[in-house]
């Protein structure tokens, strides 16, 4: 997955950035790395909540204020753009119900990779609306322009389709608006039929004859969208309805006639295409797990609640409840994993109507209340427990649950940790990535850090072939002329960072 931003706070234009299994974010304070990282929980709270606009700027995970406080204030054209590149491999899962399935939608199987550019604007205080959605795939570009009255214009490769009576409405919780047909006072969600008359007339014009609905469906089902040229050939050399192909054979690929064909046919992909993209993005960002830098201080006792809690909140306040809710089998497996990776394991004990978190160490028979230990344990435990409960706890669950993407967004995991324990954390992350590779689970760790130890530990593990360089990325954030410049630094095969900025972790004495 790739992601990028334009005009989000100081992120003037990051371009699309490839998110690797381990992606470190480094930079001085106020360099923009926190904005980049917190955009992931921002998108999660946006797709989990039914809102009037596409983005929930202020929610349960992060607070970006509103559009006016989130937009980069050094530009005259006030817009924010979210950029995504996602893999489909020809499979689109739709969440909407379409009464009729269009044969032309079979062509979506040719879309393996799609870039999505979602542009947001504000027309009044506290109000955000989607001003355009641009899709780029297989050499095609579809742009949906939306004015502040929600009226729509659709452009195919820069040409206006002149389709009328379309609105874009934010229906349900998702990032992508839904296209709706406005007929008098009635609104209808689009399906392929919204262009059916125009397509029928187009085919009739090319063929110089009337075809049955079945024949038209055969033509539509035979169209190929793997490239502009393939689409052109599937029309002008059509082998399913040969007379249609013969009559279309005199059309030139660079002609206005071919552009008009694209402007009539390709919009019919949009109902399923937009819904599939929205479903994919929603699924990805619902799988974001956020651990904030200001994690809760451990308490000696916690009050039990009759809640079935299985996810650590972003500040770790419900850690005791999550541990207490583990079954005996899960406790045993969690203990085994912790001892293998860290030489200790936490457990929740319920006594006298209170829950206490105790730490057990591999070489000690006694256990200790977490408040009697160093502050570092209360800071690392939310990270450890979050990873295990959201991923490894369900290792034996159904394949449907295990194949979801998992994105862990962690701010400063090194807080109050000895360098040796930081190294153990790195080893545990590598172990999780290797496990996920075997299980074909797409896992990402996005880590904001100031720790030289974490960076050096990864290089050391690359040198000893514990992880491949292609699975790790280091993003350097620098403020240049009031905006953030993002540079990627990569590890070489020997674990050395290529193009590392000299003196990055050192104090400037000049």
Image (tube, rainbow, N blue to C red):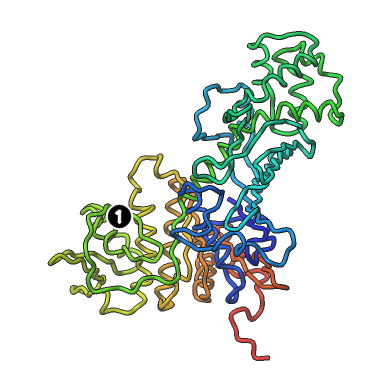
Identify whether 162 is placed above or below 410.
above
Q: Position of residue 287 (x, y in %)?
A: 45, 50
Number of marks: 1
Q: Is residue 5 above or below residue 228?
A: below
Return the x and y of residue 1 as percentages of the image width and height: 58, 50
Residue 327: image location, x then y, percent: 23, 53
Q: Residue 295, how many percent across, how many down?
A: 39, 70
Going 66% across and 75% down the picture, which residue do you hit?
A: 501
Looking at the image, residue 144 sits to the left or right of residue 309; the answer is right
Question: Residue at the front extreme?
Answer: 185
Q: Which residue is mark 1?
A: 309
Secondary element under disc 1, as helix, strand or loop, is loop
**Category of crowding for the residue at label 1, using alpha-carbon neighbours closer than 10 angstroms: few (below 14), some (14–19), many (at least 20):** some
Between 64 and 204, the one lying in front of the other is 64
- In which quadrant of the rendered view does residue 145 lie? top right
Q: Nearer the viewer, residue 203 or 359?
A: 203
Residue at position x 68%, y 66% in the image: 73
Which residue is rendered at x = 76% and y = 32% of the image? 161
Is 202 on the left or on the right of 174, as rendered? right
- Image quadrant where one finds the C terminus: bottom right
The residue sitting at the bottom extreme is: 510
Front-most of 101 and 26?
A: 101
Q: Quick one: which residue is furthest to the left in this view?
A: 352
Rendering quarter of residue 150:
top right
């Amino acid at each position: 997955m790739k992601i990028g931003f334009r005009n989000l706070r100081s992120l003037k234009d990051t371009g699309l950035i490839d998110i690797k299994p381990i992606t470190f974010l480094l930079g001085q304070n106020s360099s923009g790395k926190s904005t980049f990282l917190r955009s992931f929980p921002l998108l999660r709270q946006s797709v989990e909540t039914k809102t009037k606009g596409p983005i929930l700027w202020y929610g349960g995970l992060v607070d970006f204020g509103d559009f006016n406080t989130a937009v980069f204030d050094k530009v005259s054209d006030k817009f924010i753009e979210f950029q995504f590149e996602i893999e489909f491999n020809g499979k689109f899962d739709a969440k909407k119900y379409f009464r009729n399935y269009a044969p032309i939608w079979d062509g979506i199987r040719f879309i393996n990779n799609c870039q999505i550019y979602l542009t947001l604007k504000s027309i009044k205080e506290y109000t955000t609306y989607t001003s355009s959605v641009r899709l780029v795939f297989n050499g095609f570009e579809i742009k949906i322009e939306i004015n502040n009255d929600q009226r729509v214009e659709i452009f195919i490769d820069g040409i206006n389709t002149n389709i009328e009576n379309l609105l874009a409405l934010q229906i349900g919780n998702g990032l992508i608006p839904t296209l709706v047909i406005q007929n008098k006072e009635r609104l209808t969600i689009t399906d392929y039929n919204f262009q059916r008359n125009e397509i029928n007339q187009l085919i009739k014009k090319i063929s110089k004859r009337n075809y049955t609905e079945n024949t038209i469906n055969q033509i539509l089902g035979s169209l190929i969208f793997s490239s502009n040229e393939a689409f052109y050939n599937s029309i002008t050399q059509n082998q399913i309805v040969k007379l249609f192909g013969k009559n279309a054979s005199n059309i030139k690929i660079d002609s206005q006639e071919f552009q008009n064909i694209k402007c009539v046919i390709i919009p019919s992909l949009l109902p399923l295409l937009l819904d599939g993209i929205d479903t994919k993005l929603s699924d990805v960002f619902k799988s974001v797990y956020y651990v904030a830098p200001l994690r809760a201080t451990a308490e000696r006792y916690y009050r039990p609640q009759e809640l079935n809690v299985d996810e650590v909140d972003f500040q770790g306040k419900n850690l005791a409840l999550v541990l207490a809710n583990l079954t005996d089998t899960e406790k045993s497996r969690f203990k085994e994993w912790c001892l293998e990776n860290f030489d200790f394991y936490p457990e929740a004990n319920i006594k006298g109507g209170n829950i206490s978190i105790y730490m057990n160490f591999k070489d000690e028979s006694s256990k200790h209340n977490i408040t009697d230990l160093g502050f570092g344990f209360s800071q690392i435990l939310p990270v450890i427990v979050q990873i295990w409960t959201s991923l490894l706890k369900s290792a034996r669950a159904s394949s449907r649950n295990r194949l979801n993407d998992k994105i862990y967004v962690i701010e400063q995991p090194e807080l109050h940790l000895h360098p040796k324990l930081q190294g153990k954390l790195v080893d545990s992350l590598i172990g999780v990535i290797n496990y996920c590779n075997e299980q074909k689970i797409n896992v990402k760790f996005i880590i904001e850090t100031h720790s030289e130890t974490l960076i050096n530990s990864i290089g050391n593990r690359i040198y000893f072939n514990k992880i491949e360089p292609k699975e790790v990325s280091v993003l350097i954030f620098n403020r240049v002329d009031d905006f953030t410049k993002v540079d990627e630094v990569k590890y070489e095969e020997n674990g050395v960072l290529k193009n590392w900025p000299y003196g990055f972790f050192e104090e400037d004495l000049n």
